[in-house]
Image: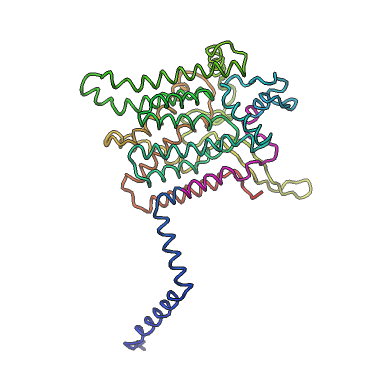
Amino acid sequence: MHLVVEPDETPTRTGGARRRLAGVAGSRPGRLLTAAGRRVRENLGDPATVLALVFVGAFVARVAWLNLPQGALIFDEAYYVNAARTLLGWPVAEGAHYAGSVAGLDPNTEHPPLGKVLMALSMLAFGDNGIGWRLPSVVAGLVALAVTYRIVRTTGESAWMAVLVIGILAFDNLTLVHGRIGTLDMLVLAPILVGSWLAMRGRWALAGVAVAIGFLIKITAVYGVAAVLLLYLLQVGGRWWRERRIAPADLRGPLVFVVTFAVVGLAGLALLDARFTTFATPFEHLRRILEYGSNLGAPTTNTGFCPGADSLPWQWIFNECQIAYLRVDVTVSAGEEVLRAAPSIDFRGALNPLLTGAIPLSALFVLWYARRTRNGLALWAVAWGAANYLPFVVLAIITHRIMYIYYLLPAVPAIAAAIAILLARARLPRFVLWGFVAAYVIGFAAYFPFRQIP
């Protein structure tokens, strides 16, 4: 038996369906839906709109439940918040860090005072609570995102490339966590990124001031100085080699940068010390900082791949030796027996797993791409990443200084740029880019500190 279809059956049905669809689309609700869909497509095709959405998402992720857990200090907030309380003359709980310290003086002398002073001002304005402790890091984190966008654009890259870099940076877990807790790490990253951007625009004196501000928060800002100088060397060093000479005019900008950094850094430290410490000179304080750092020896009695919170630089790039900053578990019990425990809050020192998974390939690709094309963003990624990561590798080899995974935070903007270059310039199929973006969002959600809605 054969099924016979009349010649006019299919056209009639199809035509009827088309007429019905046209009727729906032609109705007022249909026209509104069609126009709305067209506007959405147009807006998502505009990099400025997508950039705004990324920043809104980054802002919400950083301020959501900023005051929770109520009254709890997260990770090294136990040092810096209590130091800020001491500066304000507020009470510090007995047994806590810096309890009994002299009011008005910075007890956290292993770092310059500026970061704690900024935190104290925020607490004075917003109170001794999570908002007061953490708002400076939120602001610094958003500044770091904005200036990284400007850095990418300054290298001549498109707005879409800048959006991709910012998206990768904004939704990395380590960047998120330190962009919403009261520590010094994001406070130092923002000004040294500003300094890098200003130097790229030839504003050498202002660049020196910006990096010096970072130095007055944490002396690891010197790696920012190295990054600026290394980028300049990569940009002009080839010409020096070809011409077998260095023109004095080529050194004027970097020299202004270094001198400005040194003068502002030392003068600023002297002024801060005169008010907030008992050090007679900035050199005395710097000696204290360097001695403190060199005495932070890694434990030698522990065994195991990750014996504690400490780690080595080559472990960071594989997301090993993550640190539990703060974890609050919800337990399910039957009588006295605990059946199950699940985290409701889980702040951890760890990178987005997709970011670390892409580091080896993206690093190799950006090195090759920078050498082959002299691309501005690739050169910046190489210089910034090398200056903020390789010193720790050297220290790990020649010393036994203790280190932690969050030391990689200043290099994350360079990693984000390298991954973006790999995705955009390696001629990968488009679905690979979108697949990576989707997986990256999932990785961010998996590591988001709040596992349940409070």
Where residue 146 sits in the image (x, y, percent)?
Answer: 46, 39
248 with respect to 268 (left or right): left
Total marks placed: 0
Residue at 34% x, 42% y is 157
Q: What is the quadrant of the N terminus in the image?
A: bottom left
**Residue 61 among those drawn in magenta:** yes
In the picture shown, does residue 162 fall above or below 192? below
198 with respect to 344 (left or right): left
**Residue 373 among those drawn in magenta:** no
Where residue 193 sits in the image (x, y, percent)?
Answer: 44, 32
- Residue range (magenta): 52-80
Looking at this view, is 1 or 202 the one in front?
Answer: 202
Query: Which quarter of the figure has residue 68?
Result: top right
Query: Which quarter of the figure has residue 393?
Result: top left
In the picture shown, does residue 263 fall above or below 405? above
Residue at 46% x, 43% y is 354
Where residue 259 sits in the image (x, y, percent)?
Answer: 41, 18
Query: Which quarter of the figure has residue 326?
Result: top right
Colour scheme: rainbow
Point out the residue furthest to the right here: 335
Looking at this view, is 92 or 452 the one in front?
Answer: 92
Where residue 55 sits in the image (x, y, percent)?
Answer: 49, 46
Residue at 60% x, 33% y is 182
67 with respect to 212 (left or right): right
